[in-house]
Amino acid sequence: MIKYSKVIGIDRHPSGKGFSAVIMRGGEVLLRRELMSPDEVTKAALDFEVDAVAVDNIYEIGDEGEIRRFAGKLLKAELVQVTGSPKEGFLPLSAVGKRIGFSDGEKLNPLKSAEACARAAAAGIGFAVRVYGPETRITISRKRRYGPGGMSSERYRRSVEGAVQSLVEGVKSALESKGIEFDLAIKKGAHGVVGASFTVYSPRNQLFGIVRQIRTSSVNVKITPLYTKSFEYMPLLEESRREAVKRYLIVGVDPGMVTGVAVMDLNGRVLRLMSGRGMTRGQIARSLASLGRALVFASDVSPPPDMVTKLAAVHSAMVFSPDRPMRTSEKSEIAGILSDEQGIVVEDAHQRDSLAAAFKAFSSFRNKLEQCASHARASSDQVDLEEVKALVIRGISISDAISRSRSPNPVRPAAKKARASGERERIRILESKFEDLRTERDALIEKIRQLSSRIEELEDEMRLTRLEYRQPRALESYELERRIKSLLDETTRLRAEVDSLKSERQRLRSAICTIAEGRSIPVRRARRIAEAVPPPEEVGGRALIYLESISPAEGDLESAFKPFGNVFLILDDQPSAGVQSRLWELGVPFAVRGKNDGFVVDETLVIERESLEKMIREGCSAMEGGMKSRPDRIRALFEEYKKERMKETLRRGSLSSQELPL
């Protein structure tokens, strides 16, 4: 039968705003409160270091989420339901009160109900409730086959493993950004990640919009809810459970795609050795519940993996890791020794690593544990050796641990002294916690000193590595670098040429199509009029000639244009005023091609028929306007010339009169 030395009983207040609470120790009431909030209840449980929080129905605390949050704040204290379990059936609290002699079976008020719960749990009546959170598995894996073989197989492998690694990082980032707790196991490959498994401690519906299932030709993402019990009820009257609750455990964990777990007691005896694919923290916690209380979680590497530290935090346990990662030979030797001594069978490397981690932790505490046994035997008082060992491992001195674990003398309840006794107990507990914190502080200071020393060693190694890396390299390496740079530049140039040729080919294809459909006309560009070759088809009754430019150096323009008949001239550059006037005199209209007037492919202008007809109309219109305005311009020039001659004549006559003698 489980007996708790200190219990807090609670019952939901009729107002619904909180709980009535009673704290008891050995039949003595230490505290009675009519109305306490859930946070005040958990704080009182921690301050008084109670062993259990008893209630007649755990759903008085709230829904499953609120029950999990409440139980998570209790740390060492167990949550006890005194009225029964779903499997064994339930009794009214009034019947439980009558069974322990607290009442005559009548209905109890909230404060009396809280006291009845506390007394029932102290008498070993009820069920300890283990609370487990929902879990969801996210599996990211590559496609079963790598696909094409031969020379492409390695390239395909790199691509797939890189895609898996990118997905793993994306899912990890998404979960962290939402503050969702998870464990991650990765299987690495030669070029990235082959597969990964996330164990997410949230229900499936909370992952919608964060992670989704994917199935492609190379990568699969699968999301699977893990259906586990939310609550597990363990009877307080079970004899095997009594032994388990008193026992403290050292747990070695080797996390990964396949997780190994080894459980030892404080005497070095292996209680359980197991391994499994995708094992979660909840599964590990459920397997430990029947064996005892986890005191130390151990790893074979340093620093310990996240899963080990999270397990320790959930169980309020310590974390052990060696100063340096353990060698494979050392782990194999430990596994061989324990197999011979205790007859255990180590089935795989994961069990071996977890077993070595647990044994390494036990070995580091062995001397102190043996001293605890010697001092306990020499003590005249009855002490709980298991509790003494646990306190010493936590950093308490042996003498203080023995003093704190002595069985208290039974005290008869005294109503008048209850309040004062409760205050004294509270002060004693706070003083004890202060000593624990001071011891823990000293241990942390020593740990910091060790870590600082390790950091200095690593910094020295890093400096040496950098110096080795900066050693002068051979001349061949510089020559290779120069050659590589030259080849890279050549590759860049060739790629640019290829892109240009592709673009040119596309334009040619487009030009051929539009010419074949009759929507465009090709006109060959010439340097001089004599080299011009008009297209067979005339547009607007005119032969088309395309020149870069035309200048007076062309000579006799009339003779040059005569073989072509009626001509329309297309130019890239604007002609001079003299050339323009001469062209119009010969009846040759022209137009200067703009950026949007067709495109040139291999010295040939490809221009749309509509655009060309518009150019011809505008060129002819400009020529007609220019020729009409010519007589007016000549007349204006003649009149201006006459005025200038008149002014010059008058000026000369004035000068001549000034030169005559008096």
Image (cartoon, rainbow, N blue to C red):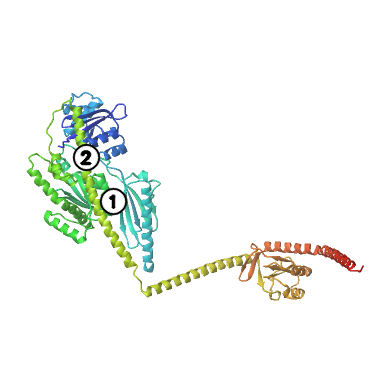
Viewer-proximal residue among 281 and 329: 329
Q: Residue at x 13, y 54 (%)?
A: 343
Q: Locate residue 157 relative to residue 127 in the image: left or right.
A: right
Instruction: Give the spatial CA distance, label 1 vs label 2.
Output: 28 Å
Residue bearing the label numbered 1 = 306
Q: Which of marks 1 and 2 is nearer the N terminus?
A: 1
Q: Residue at x 78, y 62 (%)?
A: 625
* Residue 118 appears in the rendering: no
The N terminus, quarter of image: top left
Viewer-proximal residue among 580 and 156: 580
Q: x, y (%) of residue 299?
A: 23, 53
Q: Locate residue 253 relative to residue 504 in the image: left or right.
A: left
Residue bearing the label numbered 2 = 433
Q: x, y (%) of residue 294?
A: 20, 46
Q: Which residue is drawn at 28% across and 62% down?
A: 461
Q: x, y (%) of residue 352?
A: 20, 56
Instruction: Name the quadrant containing residue 238.
Output: top left
